[in-house]
Amino acid sequence: MLEQEEENCRRSFLKTGLITGAVAIAAGVIGCNSDTKPPGSLTGKKVPLLDSAGNLIYVDEAQIPVHTNFKGITDEESRKGIPGKKFVMVIDLAKCDGCGKCTEACNKMHFLPKEKEWIQVLEMQDAPKEAPYFFPKPCFHCDDPPCTKVCPVDATFKREDGIVAIDIDRCIGCRFCMAACPYSVRVFNWTEPVKPDIIEETPSMERAFQSKKGCVEKCDFCSHMARVDELPACVTGCPMNAIYYGDENENAVTNQAGETENLSQMLEDRAAYRFMEELGTKPRVYYLPPNNRLYPKPDMNNAEENKTNSNG
Amino acid sequence: MAEEKYNLKKEIETVRETCLRPSNHWGRSTRIWIGCLLIVISWGLYCYIHQLRYGLGVTALRNYVSWGLYISIFVFFIGISHSGTLVSAILRITKQEWRRPITRSAELLTFVSLLFGGIMPIIDLGRPDRIANLVIFGRIQSPLMWDIISIFTYLAGSTLFLYLPMIPDMALCRDRLTVCDSRFKKFRKWLYTKMSLGWKGTKEQWRLLDKSMSIMTIIIIPIAVSVHTVVSYIFAMTLRPGWNSTVFGPYFVAGALYSGSAGVVLGMAVFRKFYHLEKYITPRHFDLMGRLVLTLTIIYAYMNLNEYAIPAYMMAAGEGHLLKELFYGDFSKVFWTLQVGTVLLPIIIMAFPKGRSPLILFITCIFIVAGACVKRYIIVVPTLLHPLLPIQHVPESWSSYFPNYVELSVTAACLAGIFLVITLFAKLFPMMSVWEVEEGLVIQQDKQAVMDLRNVRELEEEKTGGREVSSGTVSIKPAVVQINKTPG
Ligand code: SF4
Ligand code: SF4
């Protein structure tokens, strides 16, 4: 049963891969900011885009395929998720050097101000004698998410592809989900967010720009990128190749360098773990322990200053 | 006998007069008081509009402490609202005679604090404009939904509970209105007539009233308990140290009863003073209420022991960190002041009869109510400041919290709203349940008659001097029972 399902998924993945590959870059929603707007040209508008390496490029409007903005996706479809997928992330703590480039890339992609971080890089040390390490923390997209359980209006929900999404057109801003998430992942729009110069016609749960005054937001596993078979911003932004992203059904995860690994093999070989398994939230993000690091460890004395609590 | 009956009538007349008098009187102080309340409310309203316009960012709330004063006050108000049920329903069920003069104020307190308690979470919403989503997309699996349902049920129930015993009084007001000259006469006439529902005091009407009251009395108790239980679930059903606790339901209910009963004492004392009800609300009432508050405080202290001592013994990682903060960290001063000053000391004070005298009990109860309010804050905020993952790389203001002027103003406005509703209520309606007090007088009268009878017997006994006559006492007993039965 499961095998067959996997088989099906693999096939459909290949299919969608082929189709979407052509329009991969066409997510015209990405990378446009008022100050980076290109000067008007005679031949038609140039549209700013991000390539897979995260560089800003300008493409003439005429060259962009019609699939822009995934107009075809209905609210319902985006509530269901991308068919046949089961997204998963693996973060190799042995490679993470705490540079914070993942946060930067994420903020750039989602038009977030500096203090808003969907992926946070924390400095952690579980016990005084244990190794300190850098801990990039996106939303874990828990399989048993405490946050979606408590939402009174179903504004945050679990999709079939594993992503925990938020419908910012429905959220009433009660912040119950923020209280419920044990990992302090969710952030709230306390004031009117600065809007980028783009108009996205995608359903709200698959927009790059997800900020709305009085609503909750958080890491969305870059579902709009996943639609076009692209890697999330944090993955492509990580110069250490520490973050892997992929499809559990395919049993493969890929990092920035394009290294694709066998998921189950990797999890087994590296003794992967999920953060605070005892909470029973069943995260979809796996961590590989920080053994044999090649970079200087975080300075915990420094971290101590801006930390008020550690789980150790 | 004829003389006594005359006296009773006079007594009843005094009750009516005492209860109805404030309605006709709008003194200067009342007007100043209402004016002040209106100023506070307008300022709070202005702050709320400011908050609506610029978002919740104008408050001190930030990403870590995402619930603060508003939610604490919500829990506190809901707690206070337990007063009415407790005093009124429980004392009614147990047929406590001394409840009669205080039920109305207790029920009113329930109604008003519930009304404003229910508003607090709406004030706290980021998108109050989308409140209809709760109906359109409502998910029954969310504890917040249980809250909404139970609070609405409780509000409806307590409105009925307040209103039902008011019906005969409304009829009384309606009939009396023609005699007295008062402000807003037309409006009052209309209001009383509508509210009395054509009450004529027929046997059938009394039967219906008695019946519906006894049904409501029983229904309202489980509803009240459920309300505070599900309020606690909002916290207890999260995976956060300090909230994630199985005693939270009963702990909150105990806390609610503790603060609610103290709230009733405050209400009693205030009405007694301003409406000159000394004759009806006597030191004996304070003594008895004091005993009640004492019992509830002891129960609450016991719940506190369970809530803090058990995790403190184990000192599990996350929980331990929070507890250390409470026991000897940043929050320790407040924490110990609360435990000692508003739980332990009141127990000691109220244990002595002198501690239950009106003035001392009043002061003690002020401390209890204030303590309960701060306690809610101590339950909500420190937990949010101690998440499972460290707070790092965030602006300084995110890792601490103290409500700012917007939150304080809006909260003050809600408090003023409570006072305003109570004041207007007291101006429009009798603050004691007139008919119930009257009935109480009749019962008292009967008791007096019994006492008189006994005195007579005693005198006779002395006269005859013989011990054998004691058999006479036995023969009187049936008469005693009979007399007691008549009014009920
Ligand atoms: S990490 Fe937090 S926000 Fe993300 S799914 Fe889990 S509980 Fe929800
Ligand atoms: S803040 Fe929004 S998403 Fe979160 S629980 Fe409330 S309504 Fe749901």
Image: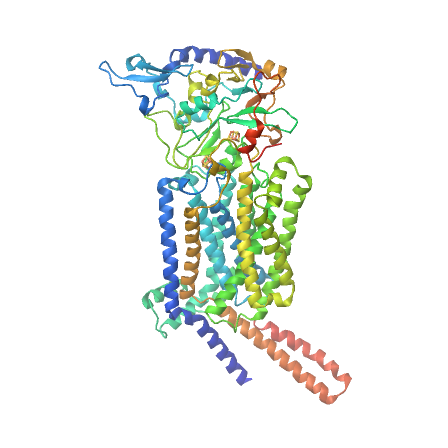
B358 with respect to A67 (left or right):
right
Which quadrant would the N terminus of chain A be assigned to in this image? top right
Toward the viewer: B399 or B179? B399
Number of numbered discs = 0
Query: Residue drawn at (42%, 14%), measured in percent from left and top?
Result: A52
Report x, y in % for residue A99. Answer: 50, 21
Horizontally, residue B98 falls left or right of residue B469, namely left
Q: Nearer the viewer, residue B342 or A224?
A: B342
Residue A33 visible in image: yes
Q: Is residue B193 visible to the viewer in this orientation of the structure?
A: no
Vertical side of B479 occupied by B102: above or below: above
Image: B452 above or below B407:
below
Which residue is nearer to you in this view: A60 or B394?
B394
Quarter of the picture containing the C terminus of chain A is top right
The image position of residue A303, as x and y in percent, is 55, 30
Q: Which residue is the extreme one toward the left? A: A42
Figure check: A263 above or below B345: above
Say which of A215 and A2 sits in front. Answer: A215
Question: How far from the left and from the top, in percent, is residue B477?
Answer: 68, 76
